[in-house]
Each structure stands twice: as structure tokens, then as C-alpha cells.
Image (cartoon, rainbow, N blue to C red):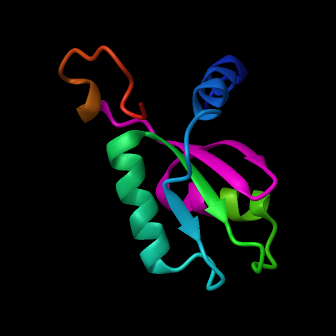
Amino acid sequence: MMKGKERAELRAEAHHLAPKVHIGHQGLTDTALGALDDALRTHELVKVAVARTIEQSPKALANEMAEALGADVIQAIGRKVTLYRHNPDLWEKPRTTPPWK
């Protein structure tokens, strides 16, 4: 489980990110989950845009995505959701910037 301070730091990092995955009017499909899984594997911190036509609330959708992919919900504001899933493989080589930059 993530601590509040860690979540706050990731929220600050996510502020400048553009959405990498879009959940369309069909909702959380296998294709959308696959795209999100790929994005989390390569970037760790991913912003998701949720279509206005989806009846489910973005917060509920965020929790569903996080549970399905083993990720943490960093925040859900309006129609934007930010998820984080640590990938130790991305940190094996020394890095000067985090993978989401």
C-alpha cells in the first residue's frame, strides 16, 4: 500500500503528463486494459482520459482498472485518472529521469 507522501509526490509528477490511454464510449474493454497495461509497464505513471459518455464514475473506473492491473490509483479528477505501477526492470540501469518523463 502506498503512503500519502509517495502519492502526493506522484500526483505532482503527473500534473504535467498528457493522457497516454483513452477509455472510449465502450468502457473498459480488453483492448483498453491491454493498452493501459503496456503503458504502465513502460512508463509506471500513466494518465488516462475517460470519455464523457461512460455512465460509470471515473473514480469507480479508476479502482476497477487498478484492481485489474495491480496498480495504485494516484488521483481521479474530473475525467482524468492517474495510475501508478512500479516496474523494477525500468530501474536496473542508472537513470537520470524517471520513466514517465
Question: Quadrant of the rendered structure where residue 16 is?
Answer: top right
Q: Position of residue 96 (x, y in %)?
A: 31, 14
Q: Position of residue 24 (x, y in %)?
A: 61, 77
Picture quarter with the C terminus: top left
User: Does the magenta run of residues contain 53?
Assistant: no
Left or right, residue 101 beside residue 49: left
Q: Position of residue 1 (x, y in %)?
A: 61, 33
Residue drawn at x 48%, y 57% is 69
Q: Which of the pair 29/13 is nearer the observer?
A: 13
Residue drawn at x 79%, y 74% is 56
Q: Position of residue 73 (x, y in %)?
A: 65, 45
Left or right, residue 47 beside residue 69: right
Q: How many marks?
A: 0
Q: Which of the pair 98/34 is nearer the observer?
A: 98
Residue at the farthest bottom position: 26
Question: Quadrant of the rendered structure where residue 98 is?
Answer: top left
Q: Is residue 55 above or below residue 60?
A: below
Highlighted range, magenta: 64-88
Question: Quadrant of the rendered structure where residue 7 is?
Answer: top right
Residue drawn at x 24%, y 34% is 89
Residue at the farthest left position: 93
Residue drawn at x 47%, y 68% is 33
User: Does the magenta run of residues contain 71?
Assistant: yes
